[in-house]
Image (cartoon, helix red, strand yellow):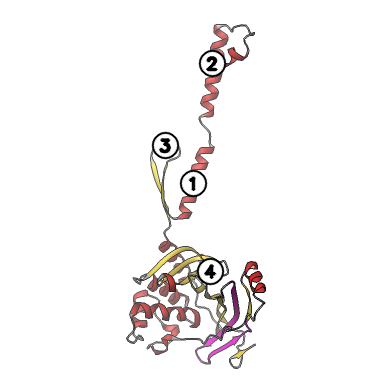
Amino acid sequence: MKEFQLIDEVMPQTPPAGHATMTAARARMTGAARRRRRPVRPKVTLAAVAVGAVLAGGFVAMPLLGGTGVQTATIPRADAVLDAAADRLAAQPSGTGAWWRREMTQVLRTKTATYTVEQRVRDVLWASRDLGYRTRRGSVSAKPLTPADEQAWKAAGSPDLCDGCLSGKTYFTPLKLTRKPVMDLPAEPQALKAEMLAANGKEAPEAWLWGASKWLLLDVESTPATRAALYRVLAGLPGVRVENDVTDVDGRTGVALTYGQASTRQQIIIDRDSGQLLAVQEADGSSAYVVERLGWTDDPAPKQSTSS
């Protein structure tokens, strides 16, 4: 063995070992080599690689621990992630309260020649089957988006950041023309799609369904089961893609329904754990409705729509 040759070379003054001594030494080294070939860590590493691949999406083939076979670990696809989120949302109770309230922040980012300005305004909507709709809108804040944008803005003479500020959002209820009250809309995707299309005029069904669904999610007191069915309606449209690990303008990550061409691509981003709506936004981050809370409440609504 080369180990013994090396010993002879670096220690030539050592008397040669006898046959019995050499045999015992080889036995010890051979046994140690066998023990080194049976570590546990490679199995743990292999399992970790498999788990990482599962989280990434797809599948991975790996040897069965302690055997020679191969098992396949399924990696969730984006549409499976959406289905799971929709199932969790549909399982939630409809909720009770005098008002259905949606709280969100509207975000608009505008670019000049040298810097980008971000405008934000808080928007709260109350909806009641008996009392109608009421809104409260905060004041607009505007600032350079990043420190680099701030430096460029100052270099440009610090012009007014609120030139062309957000003018406001009016709630939109596209299903008022349907035959059923909002709370009675179907929780089955195909039935819901048919009910929605009954309110459609001459517009292309795909584009109309996408546009109407955004406001149905943002501005209408539909049940969790109906909202979950709406996700599935949109996921089945020819022009809609389901994408995982999509981030909204506030850095929250979820599964997204994406629609439109590259220059006008829009996203509906959904929390993977609860199925709740996170945001409706332009894919390039230029504008967004960032949802902070929605659901039923007994907190009183303002007497009339106001701005503050």
Answer left or right for 129 relative to 229. Answer: right
Residue count near mark 2 (Cα–Cα under 10 Å), binned few <14, some 14–19, many ≥20: some
Read off the residue under disc 1.
Answer: 49
Q: Which mark is residue 26?
A: 2
**What amino acid type should be assigned to the residue bearing mark 1?**
Val
Residue denoted by label 3? 67
Residue 189 position, x and y percent, is 37, 74
Residue type (three-letter) at the residue carrying disc 4: Asp
Inter-mark Cα distance, 2 to 4: 64 Å
Q: Residue at x 55, y 8 (%)?
A: 20
The residue at which mark 4 appears reads as: 248
Q: Earlier in the sequence, mark 2 or mark 3?
A: 2
Q: Nearer the viewer, residue 169 or 110?
A: 110
Which is more N-terminal, label 1 or label 4?
A: 1
Q: Residue at the location (67% across, 73% down)? A: 154
What span is colored magenta in the figure?
Answer: 114-140
Question: Residue at image x 62%, y 15%?
Answer: 10
If you read the primary sequence from the N terminus, does the residue marked by circle 2 or circle 1 appear first? 2
Amino acid type for the residue under numbered disc 3: Gly
Question: Who comes first in sequence, dot 2 or dot 4?
Answer: 2
Picture residue at 46% right of the left edge, 81% below the top = 215
Above or below 262: residue 202:
below
